[in-house]
Amino acid sequence: MSDLFIGVDLGGTNIKAGLVDREGALVNKVSIPTEANLGRERILENICAAARQAAGDTPLGDIDAVGIGSPGPLDHVTGVVFRSPNLKDWTNVPLAEEVTKRLGVTTFVDNDANVACWGEYWVGAGKGCSTVVLMTLGTGIGGGIILDNRIWRGSTGAGAEIGHMVVVADGEKCGCGGIGCLEVYASAPATVRRFVRMISGGRDSSLASAVAEGGEITASMIYEAACAGDETAKEALEETGRYLGVGVTTIANVIDPEAVLFSGGLAGAADILLPVIRAEVRKRALEPVTENLTIALGALPNDAGVIGAAGCAMDRLGSDG
Amino acid sequence: MSDLFIGVDLGGTNIKAGLVDREGALVNKVSIPTEANLGRERILENICAAARQAAGDTPLGDIDAVGIGSPGPLDHVTGVVFRSPNLKDWTNVPLAEEVTKRLGVTTFVDNDANVACWGEYWVGAGKGCSTVVLMTLGTGIGGGIILDNRIWRGSTGAGAEIGHMVVVADGEKCGCGGIGCLEVYASAPATVRRFVRMISGGRDSSLASAVAEGGEITASMIYEAACAGDETAKEALEETGRYLGVGVTTIANVIDPEAVLFSGGLAGAADILLPVIRAEVRKRALEPVTENLTIALGALPNDAGVIGAAGCAMDRLGSDG
């Protein structure tokens, strides 16, 4: 045993893999296309190829364990992924078993948001904390919860759906079928919808003509406009921050973590979002729970998934035997 | 050792105490006035008197441990209660130490809502579950959370403030200083406020003249009127149920417990509240987390605190050494 682990971050576009040591340092790192549309066998091959490349000169026999952070509902105990909409022919895949067989290395599978949270908890912005919540801000709002040094998966394994806490009881319909979920108010598309509504309502903006022409507006464009002094763009993002602050308030009052961290594409707007989130939480949440609460950007924006997957595998190898 | 424990439920009006065996059966039970206005020494004496009476013929030397469920912010490790507004001269009371000294029996102190949740988890409506949330509905909304067979206290010890999750981002001001908390929409006083507003708005009710005369209206009166066929009273309660359903949705999506249970005075209206709560959760929450979720009344309305305090003491005696 070389005290080395491989972490794999399985995405719809790329598979990232890394060789990680027992202290959480990323020794080597690769990224290859997932080729998600080529189906199950090819995806499995690519996962193994990424792992082999990440191992570099280290023989696979010297790797203690492989950890995979995977999207989709899954059973982390058996390592079976039930489905993943972005991967073709990917139903009830015994991912842990398949990769274990192909690489000859014990492999563990866990939810991608959970392993990213573990990465931040282990060596990122949550280092030193025992209870950490990670909110991933993108097309949706996902997240991971570490309670008392353990991933919280919920009793059905489908818990930690932070984006689907209700923040407006009689609010807008959410894609999940629910009503008034945080995701409807604070995801990247929600920010775009708000911004377009503001423009349609007569507000001026450097992006007004793009909106009028029906061109694609992204959250990044809104952020760039805001940075360039566009007040409407700034307000649209601040309103997103305000709702995130409402969500963090509920997390603080009910779960009472030491840190709430943010990652994902929209977290790139952290310099606008974070001050609003912090102010909102200060205004709303109970004093004892917010006194020492860290609200910050994740420290491993690109590598939390890879490092966390390796870290989870290390942790589970230790505890599962 | 006789495998017997004493549980104490310290309230502002009465101290309930009970002799509880290792299976959670309540062997003997007493209730004496707290005499909260007579100050610290008298309250401590009364706690010990209640414990002695509960022991009955069993010598205190044969009691394995005493558990106290106490209101107010406290440190469950040291057993110090920082303050409790309803108890006179009750600041930084080393409760565990004082009772241990006076009774000669190891004493543990924990939050009253936590121990009530433990009681339901141990031998009540949450029996057989490993993850249970208890919501106590009264003047405020409190609660306890058991995650994976352990009380969840949060990183500062002030967590599990279920009544202060935000359900209406831009809602009414809450007594906690926050905005739009569940407690503002679903506590007993919230139900009364809603009912009075409905009457003032022109709705008819059997209690309309009582409201007009400025008489005291309680949630119990509203419940009784609803049971007698008063539509306005019924609607006021159903609206409370609807907000509770919103709160349970957030709990289900984020925490994903096996059971959400209700106790406290307002839970007496369960036959009206529960169907509304269940329908709201079915409508809103993610399917996998609600499939097997129990939403029910606690099974130990009067004894959860006493039994749970004894059970916590038993658990902590086992794990703390």
Image (tube, coloured by chain):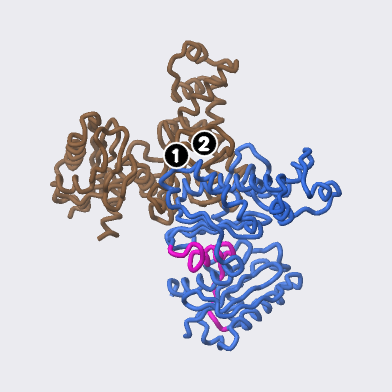
Chain colours: A brown, B blue
- Residue that sits furthest to the front in the current view: B229
**Amino acid type, residue under disc 1 in the picture:** Phe
Mark 2 secondary-structure assignment = helix
In this rendering, the answer to whether A56 lies above or below B53 is: above
- Of the numbered discs in the image, which one, if any, rests on residue A262? 1
Task: Give the residue drawn at x 48%, y 58%.
Answer: B132
Residue A22 in sight = yes
| Neighbours of disc 1 within 10 Å: few (<14), some (14-19), many (20+) | many
Question: N-terminal of the two: label 2 or label 1?
Answer: 1
Q: Quadrant of residue A134?
A: top left
* Picture coordinates of residue B181, whole percent (x, y): 62, 46
- Label 2 to label 1, Cα distance in Å? 9 Å
Mark 1 secondary-structure assignment = strand
Q: Quadrant of residue A303?
A: top left
In the image, is residue B122 part of the stretch drawn in magenta?
A: yes
Quadrant into which the N terminus of chain A falls: bottom left
**Amino acid type, residue under disc 2 in the picture:** Leu
* Picture coordinates of residue A138, whole percent (x, y): 42, 32
Task: Give the residue drawn at x 53%, y 73%.
Answer: B310
Q: Which residue is mark 2?
A: A274
Per the rendered image, the range of residues in magenta is B104-128
Mark 2, chain letter? A
- Residue that sits furthest to the right in the current view: B213
